[in-house]
Amino acid sequence: MKFIKYIWILPLILAFASCTNLNEVFLDEELSDVTATSESALSAAYNRMITDVFVDHGHLWGLQEYSTDEALLPTRGSDWGDGGVYRAIQEFTWGADNTLVSNNWSSLTNGVTRSLTAIETINNNSGDTNYSMYLAEAKALLYMYTYYTLDLYGQCPMKEPISSDDNVYVVHSTYIDTLITNVENIIPDLASLGDNSTYNGRFTKEAAYAFLAEMYMNRAVFKDRYNATSNFDFTEASVNNSSKTDMDMVAEYSSMLISSSKFSLEENYFDNFAIGNSDGSELIFTAPQHVDDGSVNGQNDFAYMPMERAQHPAEGLRGTNATCTTPEYYATWDDNQDDPRFVQKYEYDNGTWFYNNQTQSIPLTTMDYVEGQSNVLWFHFNRGFMVGQQYGPTYDSNSKYVRDTVDGVVCVKVSALKTDKNDSMLVFTPNLDFSSGTTLPQNKVHQGVRIFKFEYDPIDLSSSTSRVYIPIFRLGYIYTLRAEAYYRSGETQEALDDINMLRTSRTRAQPEDEGGDIAGKAISLNDLTEERLYNEISYENYWEMKRRPQMIRFGTFDNAYTGKAKSDSFRRLYPIPQSVIDVSGDIFSQNEGYD
């Protein structure tokens, strides 16, 4: 039964019947009805993932990426000021009243509550078919929402599931040991991916293995948040087996996925982030952005946000001129720009290639039309890092692509673009002129290398719908976890083998006159320093909500880089929102550094 894939019900506007008013402040769920079904309650818990947590740039993605060297959202002229909430994340000046901080808290803790409600509801329907599997999934979602709340805030409200005790209490970062044990305990009741109508949008045994590998990798940080030297103990005894270290467990759970016949690395790296990736060979657990019955239409944020307004991915659509990467992060690719994960040109069905660095004409018969809109042309931009003068379809005052005729063939004209704010050419430069903080003057709004990793989906001619499934855990990420675990355990050759598997499994498709397809190249053992490993991990995982935890593990998060000064270790956690502190009494205490 694919109820999760096709129902995704709207939240039910009720609260825990037995909760006190104070408890409802922290666990403000909208569902508790004795008539609720297991399916509806579980769907509501899943729904939080794809409503905002994993798909909206201002939620988990924003806190995990805008606080790093991989991504920033500067104010460009008068755009994206938004009260300075985005600049504060990049500048490390956020406080307990920052709306990104508070909105994330609300969404994640709402996910906790929905999961608790699902557990209660499923338990009350113990005679249901799939009872054990549904209960295990609901528990898995509870543990997942709790984990990411602890990752970001170091504290999370909790209530005992399936209990007459309605008191809310607070768990802290060391609760990760309990989370690990709990996830290990539910594995027997989870379905294996593909069994019992499950797919990668459902929490399966394989999702549990990936989740455990991630938790074990970050366990040392959770237990020692403010270590001034970032000298975390990654090789302490694991939670439930004193003869194995945390890194042994990362390698063990990663190996279970890597050796599984269910997954394989995509030859074209960008297929992982493309329209139609729902059955991608790397995807272990995802946040679907689109459901066939129309009950859920995703964000398209990760494709929409970096695209400039002058770039029109379909007639009537444009980008938003916002997110880019820092010069420091872009420079880490200086000697690796031939890597197939750096950029990929687009080839139309008849063999015509689009170049985003030269004038050309693309035959109209070659181009696609937006699905369901037979008169609306769709333009496919290149993917990866966009730098230098940008080219694209020219368009008229009605946002229709300009046609021209070349040798009797009607074509769409592709030429050098200008910004929509002034007469400047649209040149994406690595440098960012932040002489006045992370605000770019109007004549420099084009600055910053853009990352077009996720494919823009114009399905309904809006910026807010996408059929791209957002990877939460995928095979490439699992390889990097195992490589890091091997490296931290002194098994350098094994780490190198995993890194080279990622490097050599990818191919960049190219025109024949440019030498044809280019395969990724292996590196040598001498090349694999800690810095190189650090970069290789990001080559695989950039723009995927993994950078902040990685930077903290490697001790780079506190460093100065464009847009921020060197920061104190307390910034490794976000504050508990002030609105929560104000009503909490002694339930919550503010995190260190935010008093």
Image (cartoon, rainbow, N blue to C red):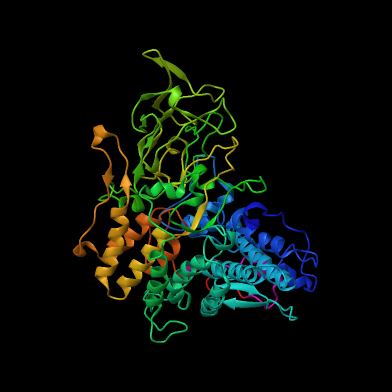
Relative image position of residue 392 (x, y in whole percent): 42, 30
Relative image position of residue 239 (x, y in whole percent): 47, 82
* Residue drawn at the location 49% of the way across and 40% of the way down: 321
Relative image position of residue 368 (x, y in whole percent): 48, 30
Q: Nearer the viewer, residue 279 or 49?
A: 279
The quarter of the picture where the N terminus appears is bottom right
Residue 182 drawn above or below residue 367: below
Q: Which residues are magenta?
A: 571-588
Residue 532 drawn above or below residue 310: below
The image quadrant that residue 385 belongs to is top left
Specify whether residue 56 is in view. Answer: yes
Residue placed farthest to the bottom in the image? 242
Specify whether residue 424 is in view. Answer: no
Queried whether the magenta region covers residue 290, the answer comes back as no
In the rendered structure, the answer to whether residue 485 lies left or right of residue 179 reads left
Number of numbered callouts drawn: 0
The image quadrant that residue 203 belongs to is bottom right
Queried whether the magenta region covers residue 576, the answer comes back as yes
* Residue drawn at the location 51% of the way across and 79% of the way down: 177
Q: Nearer the viewer, residue 509 or 66?
A: 509
Residue 170 drawn above or below residue 64: below
The quarter of the picture where the C terminus appears is bottom right
In the rendered structure, the answer to whether residue 366 lies left or right of residue 44 reads left
Relative image position of residue 115 (x, y in whole percent): 66, 67
